[in-house]
Image: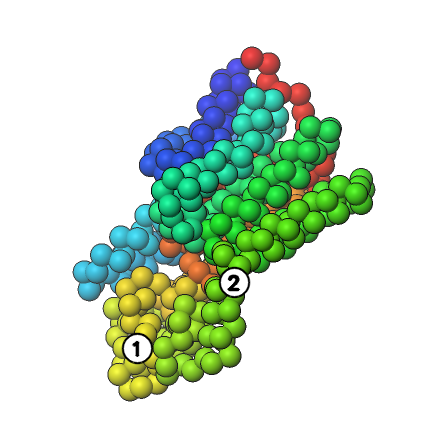
Amino acid sequence: MFTSRTLPILIGMLMTFSMVIASFVDTLSRDSYFILSYLSVIVTFWLVFFKKISLFRDRAVLLVVASFLLFGISRIAWSFLMNDDGLSIYKNYSPTASRIILGAFIFCVCILLKNELKCFFSNKYISSVIKVLPLYILLYALYDIFVLHKDRVELDTNRATVTAYFISAIFFVSLHFCAQVKNKLNVSLFFTNLIVSNAIIILTQTRAAIAIYLLLSVFYTAIVFRKSLNVKKVSMVVVLLLIFAGTSYEFLYKSRINEAITETQGYDVTKPGGSLGDRYTMWYAGLSAFKHAPMGESFQARNDFISEKIAAGDISDSISVYLTVHLHSELIEVLSLQGVIGGVLLALIYLSLLYAGIRNKNVLLIMITLCLAGYGLTDVLFFSRESITVYLLCIAVALVTGGKEDTAEQPLPIDR
């Protein structure tokens, strides 16, 4: 009774609450995530060693578990071994690494209690909360713009780029729940959320998110409704998206697009290049550091090497301010610090997620993975505590509720 009813409800409630509240009160999301993760560790050991439930029932997801576990352990090991220069920056790597490791145990619970958790998420009240979540996020976004008079939507993170990255995963989960039962209400809500979510992403003015989320959300829509596409409805949605994009172009992101074009055309690694140009320089510097120390090095050693390059005039000094944070590319950041081993383990995370998504025909998992990898091309999500927490939660929900092209009928909800 406890395993089949009470435990899945408790775990499901924590997963839902932590994911839903992330956009509004980050501290509550963080606290509930840790409660969920510690509970998942206990439950995993209890079910595996005492109840003799096998984790090998889904080998593809088990590979995902292993990849996150190994990457998290490698990051903690690197932080411990290299932290001989007393820099506070290591305090940002260890907490994210611990969340990644704990997330692996949440994925274990998703394997062990998949059917029970799937029943929980099919409950009409739980699914309804997730379906309308983008609308509540829109209200918060409008509050940011019109009441707080912010130039970019930041929500509770106070960082527009981080907000854009993690709400993308939340939006895909919401779209997924709307598409599970294709009645008139859910289909209408799906396309409403599609428009609303793209509007919010645009309001963050995060270039990578605007492009990647728009492409992936349209692609996801085409996959989900490929057997029942209504040309009239699709045309209306496309027209509305184009109208919004067109009307907002002049005052929202025209300047940022023009900046990107100008910076790319006039790029010189030895000169300041603006936001995008400096990113190119950081990537060059990170790859140079990786070639210098392919097996990894400390944070201070990497920065000293890059600083020497700057002093020699080989690299623009405009990136100096970023050296105490990160190099704005997930793979390059990992390669420049953790070396080949870290890079391979990071690639394993992406590949294992894609493999699990393709093998189980889990379109939702594939979309979340493409967001995670796509945004990682120009930024570092595994450095952000908020982003990685939300992505781990959304991946867990995808592992439980997605699959078979995300269109299979849902089991009857738990009777309360």
Left-right relation of 272 to 111: left
Does 222 appear above or below 143? below
Give the residue pinned by disc 1.
Answer: 317
Image position, residue 143 (x, y; %): 42, 38
Image position, residue 414 (x, y; %): 59, 18
Name the amino acid, label 2: Lys
Q: Nearer the viewer, mark 2 or mark 1?
A: 2
User: Relative to the observer, which residue lies in front, 351 or 157?
Assistant: 157
In terms of secondary structure, where does tag 2 sit? helix
Q: Name which residue lies at 60% across and 50% down.
A: 244
Q: Is residue 385 visible?
A: no
Does 416 appear above or below 323? above
- Quarter residue 365 falls in: top right
Q: Name which residue lies at 69% across and 45% down.
A: 237
Name the amino acid, label 1: Asp
- Quarter residue 77 falls in: bottom left
Image position, residue 134 (x, y; %): 54, 37
In terms of secondary structure, where does tag 1 sit? helix
Q: How is the image coloured?
A: rainbow
Give the residue pinned by disc 2.
Answer: 254
Q: Among all residues in the image, which is located at the extreme top?
A: 416
User: Relative to the observer, which residue lies in front, 172 or 188?
Assistant: 188
**Comes first in the chain, label 2 or label 1:** 2
Q: Is residue 145 visible?
A: yes
Left-right relation of 268 to 227: left
Q: Among all residues in the image, which is located at the extreme left?
A: 86
Find residue 53 and name its label.
none
Q: Residues within 10 Å of mark 1 (few under 14, many from 20)?
A: some
